[in-house]
Image (spheres, rainbow, N blue to C red):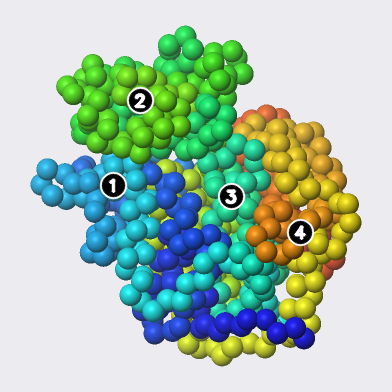
């Protein structure tokens, strides 16, 4: 057996975004040794792209808010296929997790009386998002890093995990490589936490950075864990559309939360054209009334731009397809109009939305205080992921835990804006707590040498192939196919075509080759990422074909209505004994009577 650098920890966390950092902090506080692996540099996490705020029912701006309203909003937004226990825990525990961040040094925006300020966001009944301008995710990462650096956590930067290592059914470590020189590493652990984020790089237009290749989803799947809800992809309604070099970069929902309105090429505020019946009693039909709500009026009114993300994204697609889009294939997002209501509006916008102001000035030479932005839907988030136990975050494999975007359950068919950041800290904390408990109760498992050698040989195969295809080309073709055939609006025949295309892409990936040596080789990194991207793409496509209805992030043009039968189950995917992807249905447990009463009480 080849000797590889070996590291040993009680708990190993893969991913250093909000969920991974919070899990590592909590596990370390339990007295176990903790290792933290990040694919890039510490601080370079997709969490920083969550700009608008973290949802927690603190009631600082509207005292009618409480955990019951938050729970009800989350379940309604998720179209009731959520894991209701996760939604309950999240709504109850989020305020305490936010106050904990405050105690650790997070500098939140404040109300006049010194409380944490909260803003409106899509799908939330009351102003609920604690925020730091439009840089909330960045502040979350800064706070967790500053706090975590004192906890004795061993950080392994620029390391990519290739596979999970098992002892029987139990996960006991990982096989990885360091990206700079390509040297393999073996990590032994009593418990492993996956906190690797999303799958956005399976699509052509995405807000995700290069790291978002579905690593955690695919690692868990290939190890034998179960994934659920993979059909539910959130296309954030507002990403940049111009210039092409920055297409897809997120434009925070905070712009709309601060009063931004969406208009088409005719200058019409088109979101009033399609308001769901259950929102009509909460929605104003004039910009002025909508604006009064945004600035804190106690009436339960809501501008239509703050409907759920899936709904807003489909409305934008409709405007573009029907010829009312902006010059570059989007629509207009206008925050500059508030000058009609606020004196010194430019300074107000720069103070409330500093990142957005600088982003558009630097990347598009556009001043958002005077000029509308061009925006359009961008692949942003996946509601689906690893199936976990609601209280412990343990997967269907012993010793394997998951938290954050790569774990499924809390969001159901559609995530409300702002729930992601509070999800990270609520369930990151729980994953760390229960992984540490598992580690204290179990010893290290055995790792066979043959298992490690097989993974090393597989990882090096691209160097041994002669005259194979460039892996970057295969990835690009995959992204274009998923964008075109399994995107915002889906049809059976197109998705079946995508399955045929995926088989061809798998064959091309298996024949892809890389030149040069193992040091500083981005082609090799891409070749290894392809396995994960192809796995999650197949899971998304097969799950979307299976769910023959439209619900949340899944919109079927051939099944446009919701089917009550599909509201009682989740679609699951798992690898069978022959290595094929198997689809099954999991019945959603009946909600307890007291939570049903909460839903009814909240309307």
Q: CA distance from mark 1 to mark 2?
A: 19 Å
Asked if the residue under mark 3 is in contact with the one under mark 1, i.e. CB atoms within 8 Å, the reply is no
The numbered dot on residue 562 is: none
Label 2 belongs to which residue?
368
Indicate the position of residue 149 as horizontal and vertical percent values.
Answer: 36, 71
Element type at mark 3: loop
User: Image height check: is 277 above or below 517?
Assistant: above
Element type at mark 2: loop
Indicate the position of residue 4 as horizontal and vertical percent values.
Answer: 67, 81
Asked if the residue under mark 4 is in contact with the one under mark 2, i.e. CB atoms within 8 Å, the reply is no
How busy is the neighbourhood of tag 3: few (under 14 within 10 Å), some, or many (20 plus)?
A: few
Asked if the residue under mark 1 is in contact with the one under mark 4, i.e. CB atoms within 8 Å, the reply is no
Q: Residue at x 78, y 56 (%)?
A: 514
Question: Given the current orientation, which residue lies at the most extreme right position?
Answer: 466
Indicate the position of residue 495 as horizontal and vertical percent values.
Answer: 76, 38
* Sequence-first tag of 1 and 3: 1
The numbered dot on residue 210 is: 3
* Sequence-first tag of 2 and 4: 2
The numbered dot on residue 132 is: 1
Residue 429 visible in image: yes
Between 226 and 254, the residue placed more toward the observer is: 254
Q: CA distance from mark 4 to mark 1?
A: 45 Å
Label 4 belongs to which residue?
516
Q: CA distance from mark 1 to mark 3?
A: 25 Å
Q: Residue at x 54, y 47 (%)?
A: 209
* Sequence-first tag of 3 and 2: 3
Give residue 284's quadrant in the image: top left
């Amino acid at each position: 057996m080849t000797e590889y650098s070996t590291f040993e920890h009680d708990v190993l966390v893969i991913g250093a975004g909000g969920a991974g950092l919070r899990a590592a902090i909590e596990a370390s506080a339990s007295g176990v040794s903790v290792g933290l692996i990040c694919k890039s540099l510490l601080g370079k996490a997709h969490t920083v792209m969550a700009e608008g705020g973290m949802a927690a029912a603190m009631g600082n701006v509207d005292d009618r808010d409480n955990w019951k309203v938050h729970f009800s909003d989350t379940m309604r937004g998720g179209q009731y296929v959520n894991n209701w226990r996760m939604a309950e825990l999240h709504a109850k525990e989020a305020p305490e997790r936010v106050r904990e961040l405050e105690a650790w040094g997070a500098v939140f925006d404040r109300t006049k009386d010194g409380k944490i300020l909260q803003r409106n966001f899509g799908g939330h009944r009351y102003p609920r998002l604690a925020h730091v301008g439009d840089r909330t995710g960045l502040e979350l990462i800064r706070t967790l890093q500053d706090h975590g650096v004192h906890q004795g956590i061993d950080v392994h930067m620029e390391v990519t995990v290739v596979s999970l290592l098992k002892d029987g059914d139990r996960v006991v470590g990982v096989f990885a490589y360091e990206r700079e020189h390509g040297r393999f590493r073996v990590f032994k652990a009593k418990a492993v936490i996956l906190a690797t984020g999303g799958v956005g790089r399976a699509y052509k237009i995405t807000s995700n950075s290069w790291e978002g290749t579905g690593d955690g989803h695919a690692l868990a799947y290939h190890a034998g864990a179960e994934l659920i809800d993979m059909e539910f992809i959130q296309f954030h309604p507002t990403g940049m559309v111009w210039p092409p070099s920055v297409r897809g970069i997120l434009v925070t929902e905070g712009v709309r939360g601060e009063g931004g309105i969406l208009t088409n090429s005719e200058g019409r505020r088109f979101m009033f054209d399609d308001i769901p019946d259950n929102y009509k009693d909460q929605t104003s039909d004039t910009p002025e009334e909508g604006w009064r709500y945004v600035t804190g009026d106690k009436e339960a009114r809501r501008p239509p731009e703050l409907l759920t993300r899936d709904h807003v994204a489909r409305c934008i697609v409709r405007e573009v397809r029907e010829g009312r889009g902006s010059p570059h294939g989007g629509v207009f997002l206008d925050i500059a109009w508030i000058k009609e209501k606020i004196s010194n509006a430019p300074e107000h916008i720069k103070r409330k939305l500093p990142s957005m102001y600088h982003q558009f000035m630097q990347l598009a030479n556009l001043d958002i205080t005077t000029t509308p932005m061009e925006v359009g839907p961008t692949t942003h988030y996946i509601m689906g992921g690893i199936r976990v136990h609601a209280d412990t975050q343990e997967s269907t494999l012993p010793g394997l835990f998951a938290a954050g975007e790569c774990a499924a359950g809390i969001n159901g068919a559609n995530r409300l804006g702002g729930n992601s950041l509070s999800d990270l800290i609520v369930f990151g904390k729980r994953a760390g707590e229960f992984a540490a408990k598992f580690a204290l109760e179990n010893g290290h498992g055995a790792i066979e040498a043959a298992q490690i050698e097989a993974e090393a040989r597989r990882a090096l195969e691209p160097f041994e192939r002669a005259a194979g295809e460039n892996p970057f080309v295969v990835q690009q073709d995959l992204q274009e196919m998923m964008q075109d055939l399994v995107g915002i609006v889906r049809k059976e025949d197109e998705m079946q075509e995508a399955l045929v295309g995926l088989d061809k892409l798998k064959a091309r990936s298996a024949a892809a080759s890389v030149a040069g040596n193992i040091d500083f080789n981005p082609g090799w990194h891409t070749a290894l990422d392809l396995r994960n991207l192809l796995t999650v793409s197949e899971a998304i496509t097969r799950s979307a074909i299976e769910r023959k209805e439209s619900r949340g992030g899944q919109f079927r043009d051939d099944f446009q209505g919701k089917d009550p039968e599909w509201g009682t189950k989740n679609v699951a995917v798992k690898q069978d004994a022959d290595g094929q992807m198997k689809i099954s249905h999991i019945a959603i447990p009946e909600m307890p009577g007291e939570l049903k009463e909460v839903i009814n009480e909240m309307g």
